[in-house]
Amino acid sequence: MKPVRVGLCGLGTVGGGTFNVLTRNADDITRRAGRPIVIEQVAHRSIHPDCDITGINATTDVFAVATNPDIDVVVELIGGYDLARELVLTAIENGKHVVTANKALIAVHGNEIFRAAHDKGVIVAFEAAVAGGIPVIKSLREGLGANRIDWVAGIINGTGNYILTHMRDEGRAFEDVLAEAQALGYAEADPTFDVEGIDAAHKLTILASIAFGVPLQFEKAFTEGIARITAEDVDQADNLGYIIKHLGICKRTEGGLELRVHPTLIPKERLLANVHGVKNAIAVMGDAVGPTLYYGAGAGAEPTASAVVADILDVARDIATDHHYRVPYLAFSGIDDGDNDLPIMPMEEITTAYYLRLLAVDRPGVLARVATILAEQSISIEALIQKEATEGELVPIILLTHRTRERQMNEAIREIEAMADIAGPVTRIRVESLDEGE
């Protein structure tokens, strides 16, 4: 059959990995696709040192690839928002199919991109945009297609998981482990997207859209980072039978859809609690299948390239299929029109249990006043840890509450922080059981 000709935009870590996988495994890929897949052209600013492009048509202009009449599939691996959006839309306008690993692009501009692709009858594939080499998008969109999804929860940023793992295993401070992660190349020089949950929120937005049939709505995702987590929080969570993970959670409730990324206490026996280092894992609860877990490398050159090349294979197989009969981009037909009325819930309306750590003067009546404030907001205490101290000294108080609404907890924390005997802000970490019965 006629070869599928690929234009590769970006030869950095993932682009270099994709180039090498396509060339190294060309025979196997050809047998699986039923036709050869040929790298027709590459566009790059720099070349990954492990990548030899000798004999390949190369350019520094990504739009030359997007408009090249000899190219069938444009692979966008340049990252970012604006240039990537312009590149992808140009490729679509020129009748090219698109494969991308760009979670930010899909989360923010995906609705526009999918609409343009539908109108033009081309494919946009993006498996590598979430959790690197883990095939969770295909699993959600196709493998679990018979299920009503109840919730999805995942460790979908390896940098944050690396930091929390080493804080727990070695008793180290956040800043210390972050510096190590940067030295090892796991964290960027500016780690904001990773440690503040923005990267995870991009990925969670995509997962939620596929799982629940809602348009991509990144701007409505709640994000909270891990920078305020201390070694003491990690230790106290362990004493209470929990492990702290930076989770992305989307959950169907009677009030709508929860869409949130934040530090979370989860029971030690849960599978997600035992995912360590830079690994990713996503748990999905379906009404028919029950709980399933998808685990593996969430980043890296060849793990991510594995997903990119798998998408190219899918495009090669479906390239002659009428677009009306292809699997919808986000699993549900009609999603581009926003016809699912499941609303994204405001964070203040979400209900969870809470871990609270406050620094209080060890004086009679302080704890009683804290308990009264919580009771006035209908918040009940499940567990309490208070270390001994000399009267008048500052002592940490650890509280674990039963489930309550975020709005009530916000008000309670505001009142507690206003107390004269409370020093500094209250640390609040949400608690999720992720139980199979939820």
Image: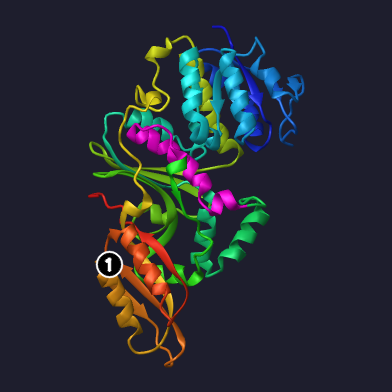
Residue 207 sits inside the magenta stretch: yes
Dot 1 alpha-carbon crowd within 10 angstroms: few under 14, some 14 to 19, many 20 or more: some
- Judging depth in this view, the residue of 90 and 210 nearest the camera is 90
Corner quadrant of residue 73: top right
Is residue 336 in sight in this rendering?
Answer: yes
Is 330 placed left or right of 180 in the picture?
Answer: left
The residue lying furthest to the bottom in this view is 391
Task: Give percent across and percent down for residue 291.
Answer: 29, 44
| Residue found at x 54% / y 54% | 195
Figure colour scheme: rainbow
Residue type at mark 1: give it: Gln
- Judging depth in this view, the residue of 23 and 39 nearest the camera is 39
Task: Give percent across and percent down for residue 25.
Answer: 59, 25
**Label 1 residue SS:** loop
The prevailing secondary structure element of the residues shown in magenta is helix
Q: Which residue is mark 1?
A: 377
Is 417 placed left or right of 35 in the picture?
Answer: left
Is 149 placed left or right of 118 in the picture?
Answer: left
The residue lying furthest to the top in this view is 1
- Judging depth in this view, the residue of 412 and 269 nearest the camera is 412
Eyeballing the image, is 99 above or below 356?
Answer: above
Q: Which residues are magenta?
A: 191-218
Corner quadrant of residue 324: top left
Corner quadrant of residue 180: bottom right
Task: Give percent across and percent down for residue 2.
Answer: 57, 7
Task: Give percent across and percent down for residue 69.
Answer: 65, 9
Eyeballing the image, is 175 above or below 255?
Answer: below
| Residue found at x 25% / y 69% | 380
Eyeballing the image, is 60 above or below 350?
Answer: above
On-image quarter of the N terminus: top right
Is residue 21 in sight in this rendering?
Answer: no
| Residue found at x 32% / y 86% | 365
